[in-house]
Image (cartoon, rainbow, N blue to C red):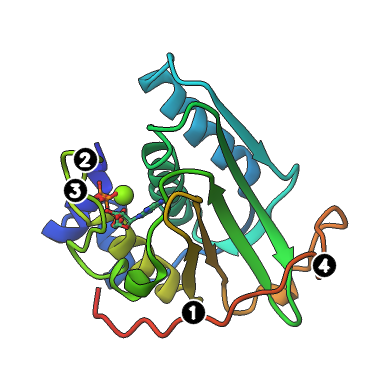
Amino acid sequence: MWNWQSQLLAGGSGTGARVSRTQLHRETVDLAPVADAVVKQLRLGQPERDVEFVSQEKVVAYCDPALLRAVLENLLGNAWKFTSTRPSVQIAFGVEEAKDERVFYVRDNGAGFDMAYADKLFGMFQRLHAKSEFEGTGIGLATVHRVIRRHGGKIWAEAAVGQGATFFFTFDGDARHAASPDTHAGERAIAPAMEQSHAA
Ligand SMILES: Nc1ncnc2c1ncn2[C@@H]1O[C@H](COP(=O)(O)OP(=O)(O)OP(=O)(O)O)[C@@H](O)[C@H]1O
Ligand SMILES: [Mg+2]
């Protein structure tokens, strides 16, 4: 399904290969319609699921649009997958103003995970859930981590078992592309970024 990931691993010529080899093509883009399109695609795959998706109206970022689409496919794909055992599902996407940076988030109310293992998630083939429960190979977040790092940003997660998960990410230099007025400064305390030392 995540074809761009296999390209990344194979060092092919698609989106994935650009993660490590060439310059980023950064532009100012609104990620809100991108997220909407990703969720629409997920809905097409499982039309029987009842998922409420909330996105801020405008989520402007200075980033490589193709790579950020891949990030959202992964994070929203995970949110979609790890909520599949819930009767009532909420997934949210947006950006919040922290002190001197903008923090993007993808939040779900799914299975969550134990924060004791949170630093493992971004490593290759690292999974906290059994394949019998939720399918996957453990490549998605390693790739996401790599894309965010290429943008000079960081990514971390907050979760609790049975209480959902939120993935946060930042881009270096985003402050220059100031926030839209409909974001909520200081609404939530930002957790310190976890050190991600794995070479993804
Ligand atoms: N939204 C989430 N809720 C709960 N656990 C998550 C969530 N996102 C990721 N995880 C945990 O992190 C692990 C790694 O995520 P990652 O996206 O890399 O792998 P995957 O989704 O299992 O497989 P793949 O992305 O390769 O299909 C997951 O297996 C799961 O244990
Ligand atoms: Mg995944």
Reading the image, the residue beneath label 3 is 130
The kind of secondary structure element at disc 1 is: loop
From this viewpoint, which residue is outermost toward the right?
A: 181
The kind of secondary structure element at disc 3 is: loop
Q: Nearer the viewer, residue 27 or 56?
A: 56
In the picture provided, is 106 more to the left or to the right than 12?
Answer: right
Image position of 166 with respect to 55: above or below: below
The answer to which image quadrant residue 144 occupies is bottom left
Q: Position of residue 152 (x, y in %)?
A: 49, 79
Residue drawn at the location 41% of the way across and 85% of the way down: 195
Reading the image, the residue beneath label 2 is 135
The numbered mark at residue 23 is none
Question: Do the residues under discs 4 and 3 have CB atoms within 8 angstroms?
Answer: no
Q: Amino acid at mark 1?
A: Gly
Residue drawn at the location 64% of the way across and 60% of the way down: 61
Label 2, label 3: how far apart the Cα atoms are: 8 Å
Image position of 59 with respect to 155: above or below: above
Q: Amino acid at mark 3?
A: Ala
Of pointers 2 and 3, the one earlier in the residue sequence: 3
Reading the image, the residue beneath label 1 is 152
